[in-house]
Amino acid sequence: MKKLSDLIPKNHSPTLPKNPASVRWTTASRCEADVSGNIQDFDEIYRRFIVSAHQQVPQFVVDEMNKPIIQKLLAYFSANYSSCQTLNVDPKKGLLLMGPVGCGKTTLMKLCWDFFNKPFRIMASRKISQQFAQEGYPALFRYGSQSYRIKHLGYGPIVYYDQPIAYCLDDVGVEPFAKHFGNDCNVIAEVLLDRYEEFASRGLITHLTTNLDTQAFTQRYHQRVRSRLREMCNLIAFPTEIPDRRK
Ligand SMILES: Nc1ncnc2c1ncn2[C@@H]1O[C@H](COP(=O)(O)OP(=O)(O)OP(=O)(O)O)[C@@H](O)[C@H]1O
Ligand SMILES: [Mg+2]
């Protein structure tokens, strides 16, 4: 019978993927292939998205206020090179959606999540804060430095850190400051600082939605986080006069 150690490849070392850029671009191009097949035409992607949006949110309105935003999101997630260039979107960064209450930020991210076949995970910031209060720092690592799919071979302790997990942190800014055994923590600031390290070294993508404007955001998370977010995310701001779509 073979020994367990014989089953492990001799030159195996459980290292991280060497070329983060390739992982990121694989994800982006898979989205495009899944949704549009051979269709490269951006207008067709737009048309299909609106049909799919109406199927899920029958009262979905497209007007002059959200149309440019929808176009940017579609250019980004389809990684359509020329549209990204025209609309000034960098597909190697994440997205920071800023806008007033009820303008449709979460809805648009959920529609993209569905239409582009789940290219990221959506997590409410409030929940991360609650998890920190319950579990402490391991909860933060899950969304920060350990935000990678883990592959276990089924024997021995070998673990592959496989693909990075892109998260959409939803409703950033409304989460409470959390305490765990007396340790105060600005939870989302910590997660973002961790994710920045991973973005810089391996291209980990982070999306955010928030009601805060740039000034309020900087006050809440400090200049250090704001500055890093500028590098990590494409800022997409809804017009301030956009209506609250909640009935
Ligand atoms: N384009 C739209 N047309 C019509 N209704 C919409 C549209 N976008 C969103 N809605 C509806 O408006 C409501 C609020 O949307 P959503 O939760 O996405 O807003 P939000 O910007 O995330 O709000 P908040 O800042 O409070 O988190 C939902 O009920 C949603 O179905
Ligand atoms: Mg929301």
Image (cartoon, rainbow, N blue to C red):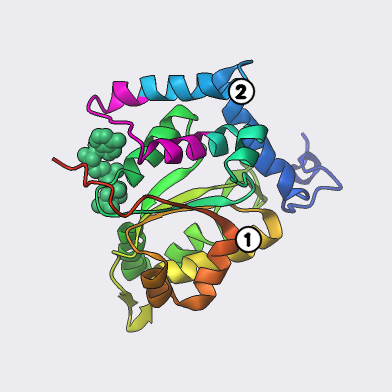
Q: In the image, is residue 67 above or below residue 170? A: above
Q: Position of residue 139 (x, y in %)?
A: 43, 63
CB of residue at label 1: within 8 Å of ligand 2? no
Q: At numbered mark 2, what does the secondary structure look like: helix, strand or loop? A: helix
On the image, the x and y values in percent for residue 204 come to 61, 53
C-alpha span from label 1 to label 2: 27 Å
Which corner quadrant of the image does residue 201 belong to? bottom right
Q: Residue at x 74, y 53 (%)?
A: 15
SS assignment at label 1: helix
Q: Which residue is mark 1?
A: 198
Sooner in the amino-acid sequence: mark 1 or mark 2? 2
Task: Name the residue at the right extreme.
Answer: 11
Q: Residue at x 33, y 80 (%)?
A: 181
Residue type, label 2:
Ala
* Residue 242 in magenta stretch: no
Residue 126 position within the rendered picture, expressed as x and y whole percent measured from the top left = 30, 60
Q: How many badges with numbers are in the image?
A: 2
Q: Amino acid at mark 1?
A: Glu
Q: Viewed as shown, does residue 229 lie left or right of 175? A: right
Camera-nearest residue between 160 and 238: 238
- Name the residue: 50% across, 65% down: 192
Range of magenta residues: 53-74
* Nearer to the camera, 37 or 201: 37
Q: Nearer the viewer, residue 81 or 31?
A: 81
167 relative position to 110: left or right: right
Packing grade of label 2 (10 A; few <14, some 14-19, many >=20) is some
Residue matched to label 2: 33
From this view, report whether residue 114 is shown above or below residue 140: above
